[in-house]
Amino acid sequence: MQNNMTEIAENPSKDTYYSNDLQKWGAEIKNKDISLKELVFNETGEKVSLCYQCGKCTAGCPLSDEMDIAPNTILRLLQIGSKEYDRKVLSSYTIWVCLSCETCMARCPKEVDLPAITDFLRSESIRRHLANRKANNIINFHKAFLHSIRGSGRLYEFGLVIGYKLRAKNLFQDVLLAPSMITHGKLKFIPAKVKNSSQIKEIFQKTINNNRGGK
Amino acid sequence: MKIGYFPGCSLHGTAPEYEASLKLVAKAADIELVEIEDWNCCGATAAHSMNRMLSIALPARNLAIAEKMGLEEVVVPCAACYSRLLFALNEFKLDEKVRMNLQPIIETEFKGNIKILNVLDFLEKYVMDALKNKVDDKFKKKAACYYGCLLVRPPKLTNSERWDDPLRMEAILKKIGIDSIDWSFKTECCGAGLSIARTDIVGKLSGKIIEDAKDRGADMIVTACPMCQSNLDMRRGAINNYLKKDNNIPAIFITQLIGLAFGYSEKDMQFDKLFVPISFSNNNFSNNNDNLKMQKSKVKEVKV
Ligand code: SF4
Ligand code: SF4
């Protein structure tokens, strides 16, 4: 368990827990030679060709200075559609640090749903083992979160943090301000559980273990 | 009158004061909140970051149960849950593939005949009228109403008219005699889901929000989302680190203020759960020296 976790912490793409059939999908990509923008269209219904590079998305993005590729540039790279650029997009830090704040979409004159595209790019980047290493903590957090609700149906903050710390190999960072949260009655030590938790496991089984991530 | 209620993990975990105040406010307005039986987590950012159908199925199970319970409306006080539930309902209505595939996944029948209210919808529809003559002089403070992202965006989903400069909280607070400031950060992002993986980003984004509110003379920040509130309140250590100064402007839930106006005590409204303290009693608000000292020690305690 510990070894496995260490390995996953270093390369969360190895965590096949949430995306089985990696080989199968990989083979499919090679065979059909389908470009990422076509895949984006198939899986999200969004046409990247609509974007005319006005840059409003990047101008309004609260995180553009944290990103390695600006939001409008992600769309430009997708439009060009070369293998090299597709790879660049999928291995960007941008797609992981995006907060899904929806500002870009609200301001886009062409109503390009960039947050929806980004969501799909995330699952695709994991599937192809291309996730940016700098994003490991963020990916580990998402996985620890899903792990927590997969088990009990509800989020258990304390369990989430333990799971995250194991994955992130950072046992000493006080990620949840635990002592002050306890004195304020904000951290519980007994997880709440959905009675019909097998139903929740089924939902995971039939979605995340069974499809590509998009539509 | 009975209305469905989806608490979500935050209200049962890190934001008990939000649940307590919402329930008492509903009671004062003669509304019974009926919790959705055996509800599950909406999946939040993690689910939609990893898999679209998962991010639809998790909220949809809750909506299907609510429908089965005969509920016509569900109030969802957490803005993040609200957004996910609304998204799931919307996709169910618009996407035939979702309609076809959903039932076997959630193993519950769902017709999509349910209405989802966020906390502002709920207050406007069911509480506003009961707030007549509730103006109180002790509330003569300036509020910075903070909406965050998901109560207003994406506008296509939330149907909000003034998504860049909403005035709904302002109108509700006016009813109890609280004036609000005009400011630039009411719909800026607080850092939300990166609270744990990139606390520094939360410090920066929330820091800008706190600073603008303070600079424009607000006495408090009023929120309507447990994620926003916890970032602005509990993460004050990271925020003050970013701002390089101690900033003690409190961040409180709108329902806590309305509860006070209905005559409940600060204890009922669980003011003690807030990290950055606030009190309206004896007119001491944040001018009281002891109070300030307490704030300092508390803020220091918040390690990052
Ligand atoms: S705002 Fe829309 S059209 Fe403009 S660059 Fe961004 S995605 Fe393209
Ligand atoms: S949704 Fe992501 S890309 Fe769009 S503005 Fe927000 S953080 Fe930036």
Image: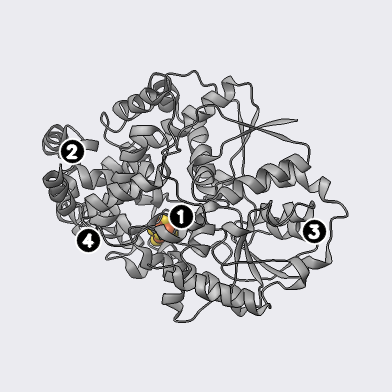
Pointer 3 residue: B176
Position of B181 with respect to A111 (left or right) is right
Q: Are marks 2 and 4 in contact (CB under 8 Å)?
A: no
Ligand 1 - quadrant of the structure image = bottom left
Give me the C-alpha separation between circle 1 and circle 3.
33 Å
Q: Amino acid at mark 2?
A: Thr
The answer to whether residue A63 is visible is: no
Mark 1 on the same chain as mark 3: no
In this rendered view, identify the residue nearer to me: A48 or A155: A155
Instruction: Give the label, 2 or 1, closer to the camera.
Output: 1
**Badge 2 local density, few (<14 within 10 Å), some, or many (20+)?**
some
The relative height of residue B75 versus residue B295 in the rendered view (above or below) is: above
Mark 2 on the same chain as mark 4: yes
**Badge 3 local density, few (<14 within 10 Å), some, or many (20+)?**
many
Q: Secondary structure at mark 2?
A: helix
Pointer 4 residue: A134
The circle drawn on residue A182 is: 1
Q: Secondary structure at mark 1?
A: helix
Q: Are marks 1 and 4 in contact (CB under 8 Å)?
A: no
The answer to whether residue B254 is visible is: yes
Task: Point out residue A48 in the picture as x, y percentages from the top left corner.
Answer: 34, 50
- Reading the chain from its start, which is encountered first: label 2 or label 1? 2
The circle drawn on residue A16 is: 2
